[in-house]
Image (cartoon, rainbow, N blue to C red):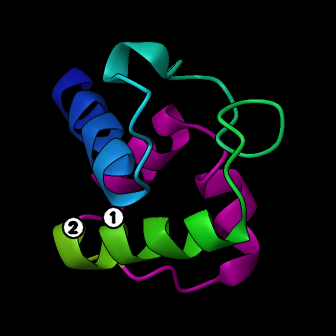
């Protein structure tokens, strides 16, 4: 799980062009949106693409997105539970 969390942090930094942030700067349990990392709806679309391209996961129920995308840990949990 820790390996997946580190990989996710690096993918977010690369895909979202978070150039001034290192994986160590991202709190695994902090919110990704709002007060936490401060991501927005465009970033959410990028995360959806990361899930589809890197993990073969499509989010079937968009209403689950808020829970899935809450933090790096919730994202990693979702990937572990749904990766083929």
The reply to whether dot 2 and dot 1 touch (C-beta < 8 Å) is yes
Q: Residue at image x 59%, y 22%?
A: 29
Q: Residue at image x 44%, y 56%?
A: 16
* x then y, percent, for residue 80: 29, 49
Which image quarter: residue 60?
Answer: bottom right
Q: Residue furthest right?
A: 35
Mark 2, residue position: 55
Mark 1, residue position: 82
* x then y, percent, for residue 24: 37, 13
Give the residues in magenta. Answer: 58-84
Label 2, label 1: how far apart the Cα atoms are: 9 Å
Left or right of residue 33: residue 72: left
Which numbered disc flags the more N-terminal residue, 2 or 1?
A: 2
* x then y, percent, for residue 53: 22, 77
Which quarter of the figure is the N terminus placed in?
top left
Q: Is residue 68 magenta?
A: yes
Secondary structure at numbered mark 1: helix
């Amino acid at each position: 799980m820790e390996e997946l969390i580190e990989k996710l942090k690096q993918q977010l930094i690369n895909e979202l062009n978070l150039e001034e942030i290192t994986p160590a700067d991202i709190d695994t349990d902090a919110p990704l949106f709002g007060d936490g990392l401060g991501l927005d709806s465009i970033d959410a679309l990028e995360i959806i693409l990361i899930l589809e391209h890197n993990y073969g996961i499509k989010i079937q129920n968009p209403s689950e997105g808020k829970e899935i995308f809450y933090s790096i840990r919730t994202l990693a949990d979702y990937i572990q539970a749904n990766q083929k």
